[in-house]
Image: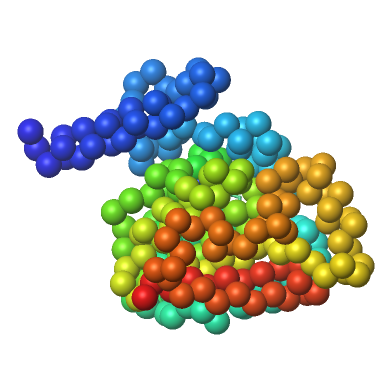
Amino acid sequence: MTPFQDQICDNQQELTQRVRVMKPTELMRMPEVLSEPDNVGDVPIPAYLSDTYTWAYLKPSSIKIFDHNWVVDTILWGNNRRLQKTVFESLEPATKVLLASDVYGDLAIRLAEFIGPEGHLDIVDVSPVQVENCRKKLKNVDHVNVRQDDLAYLKNCQYDAIVCFFLLHEIPDDYKHRVVAALLENLAPGGKVVFVDYHKPGPWHPIKGIISLVFDTLEPFAKSLWSSEIRDFAADADLYRWHKETCFGGLYQKVVVERQ
Ligand SMILES: C[S@@+](CC[C@H](N)C(=O)[O-])C[C@H]1O[C@@H](n2cnc3c(N)ncnc32)[C@H](O)[C@@H]1O
């Protein structure tokens, strides 16, 4: 057996394990032939994503509507640049970085520029439409690799830094546990994860009511970030150093987790 065949077998085995933990409705969506996960379209889409966010992430028309800086900035109440800046403040150029899922707007492009050709940027997203779009956005950038995978199954990587920008509020709590664990497990010694996401705003925050309504209507997994800390989703939280700061009246948080 060649090393390449070995790799395919590993991937087959992993996909078979994933099938065992999937619901019957998800199984119906599985391709008949299990093949290498790096081939876009082969990785199963988690049920929460297709059930809740098809309109936002799984259709080509979503890209046309949402993939503009002004749209992201509107959704973030004018804070997009400020929140991106806080990410860059925690990173170093010329390092190996993972962007945990694609983000609408120019974050991936700016991250690639910031890291520079001396470093490397991986972008992993489970949506084939997002992967294809992100590859187009970064098509002539050699130090970037975009691939389809489910972050809950990330393994065998050693990143200096992982950026997780507004992903956690869009995944159910059991998946929050799995994704946080997978990100922490794939840090190099001394590496860090930078989470930027929603946080419970102060009681008199002028837009708390609107945000609450948006979450209740469109974002069913978001409010657990109001009642729990991100570190509550980590299994071995004490093995890491945690630093949290909030901004915009507490509506947003940045949590930097460093592997000791
Ligand atoms: C980063 S989050 C939302 C970010 C922000 N709302 C924006 O402006 O794009 C959305 C992305 O997460 C991806 N995603 C959701 N669950 C995932 C998972 N388990 N593994 C990898 N990508 C995932 C979706 O496909 C989508 O592209």
Residue 221: x %, y % from top left: 68, 46
Q: In which quarter of the image is residue 200?
A: bottom right
Closest to the observer, 23 or 100: 23
240 shown above or below 48:
below
Q: Is residue 102 left or right of residue 7?
A: right
Q: Residue at x 73, y 52 (%)?
A: 223
Query: Toward which corner of the image does residue 87 lie, by quadrant?
Result: bottom right
Instruction: Tell which of 212 and 146 is nearer to you.
Output: 212
Front-most of 39 and 185? Answer: 185
- Place of residue 3 in the rendered image (x, y in percent of width and height, measured from the top left): 12, 42
Residue 20 location, x and y as percent? 39, 26
- Please, which residue is most extreme toward the left here? 1
**Splitting the image into 4 quarters, where does residue 203 fall?**
bottom right
- 119 left or right, relative to 54: left
Above or below, comparing residue 40 to residue 71 in the picture: above
- Residue appearing at x 60%, y 54% in the figure: 168
Taking the spot 71% from the left edge, 68% from the top edge, the residue there is 252
Is the image coloured rainbow, by chain, by secondary structure, or in one colour?
A: rainbow
Residue 23 appears in the figure: yes
Q: Can residue 63 be seen in this view?
A: no
| Residue 49 to residue 160: above or below | above
Q: In this view, does 96 lie above or below 41?
A: below
Q: In which quarter of the image is the C terminus?
A: bottom left
Q: Where is residue 213 in the image (x, y as percent from the top left)?
A: 86, 49
Total numbered labels: 0
Could you tell me which quadrant the N terminus lies in? top left
